[in-house]
Amino acid sequence: MTPPAAALQFVRALGAPGTVPDAPITVNFHPDRLLADGRTVAACLAADGVYRSQFETRISNGGLLAYPGGDRDRWEHAMFGGAYRGVPGRPIYGALNLAGHPDGAAPRFGSCHLVLAPATVTRATFCHGDSHRGPVAVGTADAFGTITNALRAQLTRDGAALGVRAPQPPASAPSPASASDVGAPSPASASGVRAPSPASAADVGAPSAASASASDVGAPSATSASAVSPSSARSSTSPGQASSGQVPSAPASPPVSSEPSSVSALSTDAAARLFAAWEAAVSERRDSYLALLASPSSRHLSPDGPTPAGGSVRRTGSGSGDVRAAGPRSADPPSADPPSADPPSSGSSGAGARRVRPRGPDPCGPDPCGPDPFAALAPGRTLDDYVEAQLHGGLVLGEHVTAVVACPSLRGTPAAAHLGSLGMPVFWHAGFELAADEFPAELRGPRVPPLAREIAARYGRAVLDAEVIGRAARAAAGDPERLQQIKYLWHILVLLGRPHSGA
């Protein structure tokens, strides 16, 4: 039996009857972070066409835990029954986007996310929360009941789950959906597309720096050859994974509320109605997200400029032939990274270039692309509140990914050009930005506010966003302690940031 088959069999036996909802797995990642060879994650994805685990990329946003004998190795051994040994073929980490969050199901791992094809759920395992915590609720696509029950318990306890608060259920609402129809889609409504509003430190309920967990110190996250770092600030890609090299940390998701905390004392019938109301709200959000991904009117970037979603084709340098097929690509992405304006960083090879607008119409800019409908969807801000997904059997971009949803702060950068060369639609969510003097010490410790001001002064930016934080991360390559603090900047940006002015 192959390691992926053995892992799936082991986890399936621990799950309970129930079918996974019709929701995509998303893999969050930071496309502008540097790999050990000096290339950015986006450049590596464009060149190789494969997303690799942190075991292979050896990249981290803080401390590296994905190596034989390391913490991630031990966690995977326990979680998958010893199915994996050595480095090759390890699972890729993401999260199930049940609530259709436009910033991805696990934004702690990155400003952008890959949307995986529906068929990938059949070779994925899942857990409620991040795997570094040793979750009890695990399952597979055909044994999802345990996770459904865990979400039900979370909702009863907190009144919210996956960043979505349950609306007040009607006095006599229908009984809750069974595990098999959890998340059944319902008609999308305007509430699924309301404009995001900034959260305040007071209502976010993020953990203080003192409560940082292993996930905050470098737990692996997923990315591809473009892995980015792990950590509680999941700055690279999917949860608990090895591409971004990050693992979620203590709960720092959207507000779960200080309202009636007597939810846990609800009667069985009231709890059932609460769950049914929450399911309807989650399905509505997810329907809006999926509708935009499928909409031919939504615009995206391609090597030849914006075209209707679903109509992009990655072409060779000669302009002929479709090269979506799996496997390494012989040609580099269309545009090379311009010289870097950042101070030299170890092994950068110029990959840490600051944003430079290309001559002529910017293929990622507001004029050709216009405001993306995705920017109207309210962000989830779910740093720690998600259903983690572990994808077994590899992730080939041309076969297993249907779209990329990117941060608007990256428009006009080399990273965006690389993403545009992948041969799939590129959408833009609302993004996040926050003034440098608005980063509080309460969420991630006293070193964060001065770091935010230092980076703002260094790059001449009074307002920080994913792009400028990425520049700071590239300049800090090889300095785990500084990268950890920069990761905290990203966490706070997700929690408190306002919609990006370039969205």
Image: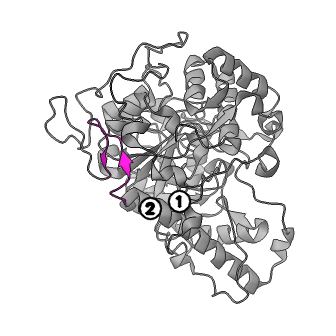
In front here: 21 or 60? 21
* Residue bounds of the magenta highlight: 295-309
Q: Main secondary structure of the magenta part?
A: loop
Residue at (68% x, 50% y) in the render: 133
Question: Which residue bears the numbered disc 1?
Answer: 100
Badge 2 or badge 1: first in the primary sequence? 1
Residue 180: x percent and y percent? 51, 78
Residue at (33% x, 45% y) in the render: 396
Q: Is residue 209 left or right of residue 31?
A: right
Amino acid on which disc 2 is placed: Leu
Quadrant of the rendered image containing residue 343: top right
Disc on res. 114? none
Above or below, 187 against 54 in this view is below
Disc on res. 290? 2
Report the number of discs: 2
Residue at (85% x, 68% y) in the render: 261
* Label 2 with label 1: CB-CB less than 8 Å: yes
Q: Would you say residue 45 sits in the magenta stretch? A: no
Q: Quadrant of the N terminus?
A: bottom left
Residue 357: x percent and y percent? 42, 23
| Residue ranking furthest to the bottom | 172
